[in-house]
Image (cartoon, rainbow, N blue to C red):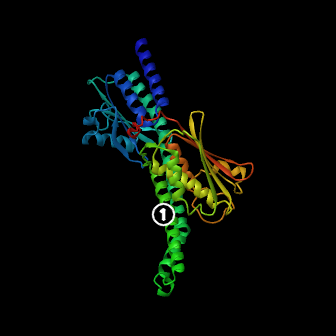
Amino acid sequence: MLRSREQRTEVLYQVARAIAAAADRRAFAGAIAGHLAYALHGEIGIAWKDADGRLERIVSGASQSWMTSEKEWLVALWAYEHGKTAGWSTDTLASSEAWYIPLIGPSETVGVLAFKPGSDKRLANDEENLLLTVARQMAVAGERDLFQERSRQAAQLAESERLYQTILNSVSHEIRTPLTAIIGSASALQNDAIISNPENRHQLLEELTIGAERLNGVVTNLLDLSRLNSGMLSLKLDWHDLHDLVSVVMSESRRALAQHNVSVAIADNMPLVRIDFGLFKHALSNLLTNAASYTPVGTAIQIVANTMEGAVQLQISDKGPGVPEAALPHLFDKFYRVPGTPAGGTGIGLAISKAIVEAHGGTIGVAGVPSGGLCFSIRLNVEKQPQLPEDRSSQ
């Protein structure tokens, strides 16, 4: 009796440990099933309710051949829907191979625990009590996890609604504005009197290009945000030189930076960085475009790169008016725009830059500059450098 009691106490202890250590109800179900099966000399099956209220036909700890067979599954559904035990050793559907116990939490039934005996011998009272006690523990833990899952889904839904609203706002302003310019310029180019003048033609083509580039930037940001939210952002890593990266970003952002004095200072002997060139280029482009958009015409923008404490540090600073101290922690939040800023923009460019940098294992931060403006800092760990091929031309 003492050995049996000690074994039951050990099972309850292991069940409590499994529940505390597991990430969710499906994770602790397998461990609990193993402990119960060993202690009761039978097989254990556990089926949970999903977030939509249906009993999932995915069983932990049991062979799919018996609990999910048509006959046994109907008994499991009956126990789940009626909130009563059924099956083997009961007066309800007694021809079943297993005993089905509904997992009834404080406010709802969250699943079914099934026990298939290894012999025809009925369970002793203490064994039944052990099974029912574990069922109650699992029900409470399972309901808590179910609530958390629903909360996460609600948060994702709210974020999706917010993204949907932002896209609508982008369509109404950030997309419509360049589209209007493109349509207007294209219509003007159909006028023979206008296009016969080289100066007019050049100006209209310039407006077409600016409108198309602005539209492309908005669509690219929205697509990247969608990829980030869906978890589908995959990196194509390779070794690159920071000089090349900054040079390409400067070239592609020349229109946005045309009315600013941009200086670049990259230290000598900079190590190569292992990055997704296209994505990182987009991150830097967003930072430069942000600096150009919210600083007065003619002010300076500085790009500085060096190494510090085993990391590559890249800084982009401007001489603009800066932002209130309270706004600094929120600049990388999705959809956040500093109160009082001019109309335009979706508030996602900096959030995308942050996500891209962090996906590379780096960090990004922002601080106010004492003389005015902002300084964005990116840090990437210096990895072991690749073995470069020898230059045979010098031999």
Q: Amino acid at mark 1?
A: Asn
Q: What's the residue at 66%, 65% (across, down)?
A: 342
Residue 65 lies, with reference to residue 164, above or below; the image says above
Q: What's the residue at 48%, 26% (across, down)?
A: 17
In this view, the residue in front, 280 or 123, is 280
Question: In the image, residue 121 lies at what x, y percent?
Answer: 28, 23
User: Can you say which quadrant of the picture contains the N terminus?
Assistant: top left
In this view, the residue in front, 298 or 109, is 298
In this view, the residue in front, 354 or 31, is 354
Question: In the image, residue 225 lies at what x, y percent?
Answer: 49, 54
In this view, the residue in front, 241 or 341, is 241
Residue denoted by label 1: 216
Q: What's the residue at 28%, 33% (across, down)?
A: 63
Q: Is residue 202 left or right of residue 393?
A: right
Which picture quadrant has residue 299? bottom right
Residue 245 seen: yes
